[in-house]
Amino acid sequence: MTEEKTPVLETKSLGIQFGGLKAVNDVNMQIYPGELVGLIGPNGAGKTTIFNLITGIYQPTSGSYFLSGKRMNGLKTHQVVEAGIARTFQNIRLFKKMTVLDNVRVAFNKDMKTNLFQSIFRTPHFWKEEEETTKKAMELLKLFKLEEFANQHAENLPYGKQRLLEIARALATDMKLLLLDEPAAGMNPVETAELKESIKMLREKFQIPILLIEHDMSLVMSICERIYVLNFGEILATGTPDEIASNKEVIEAYLGKEDDDEGSGA
């Protein structure tokens, strides 16, 4: 008998209500170790709201969510990050006036042991930890082929490189789960191809489970093992890319029913 794996992320009847509106309702998902799972749906379906629930920006009004079996309801965002959930955002959120290197270094701060005295007086322990942090940050930049930009301000990076820097910074938090919110948004085809290779590299090198929100269906279908489809705040379908691509309900959610189109006279 094979031992059943514990999901890295599990949501049970997760939901949130704003006034009389159920923005997310009865969402049940499981993400297992090493999986790359897509979360797709029409605009306004509630995808980013789910990310905001999972990261403590919003608190659920119903249901629960768990990280490696531990219930996470009620935790603030910084506690969620400390527990091991990292995310990127639709709108890039870098420290744009800081260097590329310092954007990654700052994510290592939560692991630093230097106290206030050591920082003020620049003790040998302070310099040793600074050196170790810089080394680890540079290793991450090399993984994403960003080392040549290390001393540039983040705001001067090309758009696609800024996206990769945001993922590199998330990696520095030593997470158990990575949430990517539309990482290909605004990218040209070359940048999207580079992103795709970076995500593949992440999985192969770190075996990090990833939950991906993305409107670029060719990207989703080519790299995700499983896909959840959200519509009006509820899970409409789940399955492999092939199963989702041929699902009539999913096609109708994206394109509308033929009867509706004919009846509208549009």
Image: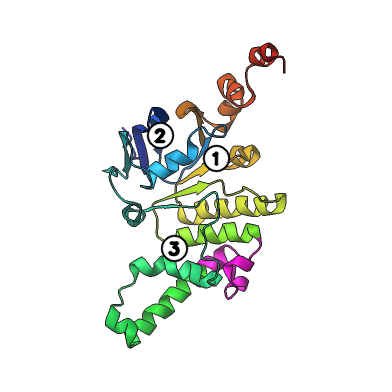
Measured as percent of width and height from the top left, residue 260 is found at: 64, 14
Identify the residue position indicated by label 2 in the image: 29
Say which residue appears at 36% left-offset and 38% top-offset. 10
Q: CA distance from mark 2 to mark 3?
A: 26 Å
Q: Look at the numbered discs 2 and 1 and tell me whether their residues touch, using CB distance below 8 Å.
A: no
Three-letter code, disc 2: Met
Q: CA distance from mark 3 to mark 1?
A: 23 Å
Q: Is residue 3 magenta?
A: no
Q: Rate crowding at label 3 as few (under 14), some (14 to 19) or many (20 or more) other CA atoms within 10 Å.
A: many
Which circle, 3 or 1, is nearer the viewer? 3
Measured as percent of width and height from the top left, residue 24 is found at: 42, 32
Q: Residue 172 has which mark?
A: 3
Q: Rate crowding at label 2 as few (under 14), some (14 to 19) or many (20 or more) other CA atoms within 10 Å.
A: some
Q: Residue 10 has which mark?
A: none
Quadrant of residue 155 within the rendered picture: bottom right
Magenta segment, which residues?
A: 140-158
In the picture provided, is 10 more to the left or to the right than 157?
left
Looking at marks 2 and 3 on the same chain, the residue that comes earlier in the sequence is marked by: 2
Measured as percent of width and height from the top left, residue 166 is found at: 53, 59
Say which residue appears at 62% left-offset and 61% top-offset. 161
Identify the residue position indicated by label 1 in the image: 224
Query: Which is nearer the eye, 263 or 196?
Result: 263
Three-letter code, disc 3: Ala
Q: Which element type, helix, strand or loop, lies under badge 2?
A: strand
